[in-house]
Image: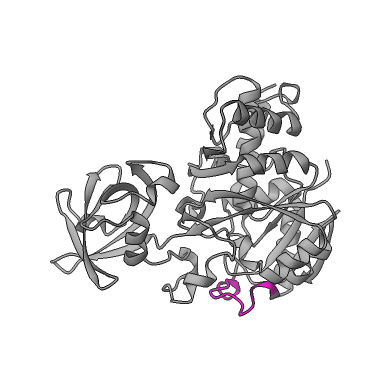
Amino acid sequence: MKNDWLEKAESIQLEAYFYDLPDERIARYPLQNRDESKLLIYKDEKISHQHFTDLPAALPSGTLLVFNDTKVIPARAYFQKDTGATIEILLLHPESPSRVISEAMIVKHSCVWECMIGNKKRWKRNDTLTTVLEMNSRQVILKVDYADYEKNHVRLSWDKDLVFLEIVQALGEIPLPPYLNRETEEADKQTYQTVYANHDGAVAAPTAGLHFTERIFQQLEGKGIQKSFLTLHVGAGTFQPIKVSSVTEHRMHSEQIVFTRKVIGELLENRNMIVPVGTTSMRSLESLYWFGVKLYRSETAEFHIEKLYPYPFDEHELPSAKESLQAIADYMDSSKLDFLVGETEIFIFPGYQFRLCKGLITNYHQPGSTLILLVAALVGERWKGIYSEAMDNGYRFLSYGDSSLLWAQQS
């Protein structure tokens, strides 16, 4: 029955995906040397404890590591009203003149973004906030008002011939995850950024990648481990807790993904041993498979994966990983596309069957979060033992914490 998946999903009890996380186990600061973090390895029902510098030796020859090369922007800004009230704005997603993040970063003079607004009750519908930015020995006047009050769409306008990325870099600060419960510091500009960050647009770092250094990359290359890069601009929704009793009703955030034609070819060549670095890379790769399904089934050429799209299918209706990726390659070739821009809301929870990913490099996530459900989908009920082992062995948790290499449970 096609409704079996829904019955199983609705039977998921969120309480079963909580664990006790003492406050002192949250890593509020990174290690001095990124690659000296601990590394828990889970494979074939067995757990071993190593260090991240051991990762290259732990990966089989022929592995393709897939990284998310998004770059965190200083997306949090504060504005002072004449009344003394402070208004906080967190940029979430561009709305106009372009919703494509790479294009939104080079807009001049004015743009509109969807935002989270702190102290909104003090910022009335028709009020304009103004600040003066000191940039390269000249003053830039920035004005901020509502483009749509109900939707929290905020218009930013500036009086100099500068692109938006220059404005936001002068205006804002790196938005650390709320659970770190501390102010952003100067050092976070470097430490809360992967060494391979390349495309501006994220409001949160793909933190599994924070452990990688040039030393690790050299060791991986020496072993013949290949690497590939996609871009998913991580949104603030990644920290949104599940607040509904039925997990399928949780509102998943939509995030923008970019895949190049080169990456599609690399995935086709190495499809039997793909290991994403981080949950954002995993969600991107699995979303890519489902975009290929839409093309294969001639449904649409729109790259938008709804949160529950993967679940109702019978297995015989679906193409193989190779067929799905080939459908994408053929589509890009016929359309003369060098890259794809898509959106995904995919929700991966227990019962999901992974199509491209054989394992996962990831940190330790918040209790009862969508990312715990993703880990449980990959390793099954054994996630509890993995987290318990990490807790008992002094691992550091969350964004600045330690790492794990998890292999999918055998079906």
Out of 95 and 108, give the one closest to the viewer.
108
> Residue at image x 30%, y 42%?
151
218 to 294, vertically: above or below: below
Task: Please check the rendered image and state whether residue 33 is part of the magenta-colored stretch, yes or no.
Answer: yes
Q: Left or right: where does residue 381 sit relative to residue 5?
A: right
Kindly report the secondary structure that dominates the magenta region of the rendered protein.
loop
Name the residue furthest bottom. 32
Residue 196: x and y in percent read 59, 62
Residue 329, position in %: x, y? 66, 32
Q: Is residue 363 visible?
A: yes
Q: Which residues are magenta?
A: 22-35
Vertical relation: 162 (above or below) 393 = above
Direction from residue 87 to residue 357 in the image, left or right: right
Quadrant into which the C terminus falls: top right
Residue 257, given in percent of the width and then of the height, sits at 54, 44
Q: Is residue 233 left or right of residue 347?
A: left
Q: Quadrant of the N terminus?
A: top right
Residue drawn at x 77%, y 41% as measured from the top left = 269
Query: Which residue is at 38% across, 47% downward?
Result: 104
Q: Position of residue 185 (x, y in %)?
A: 43, 76
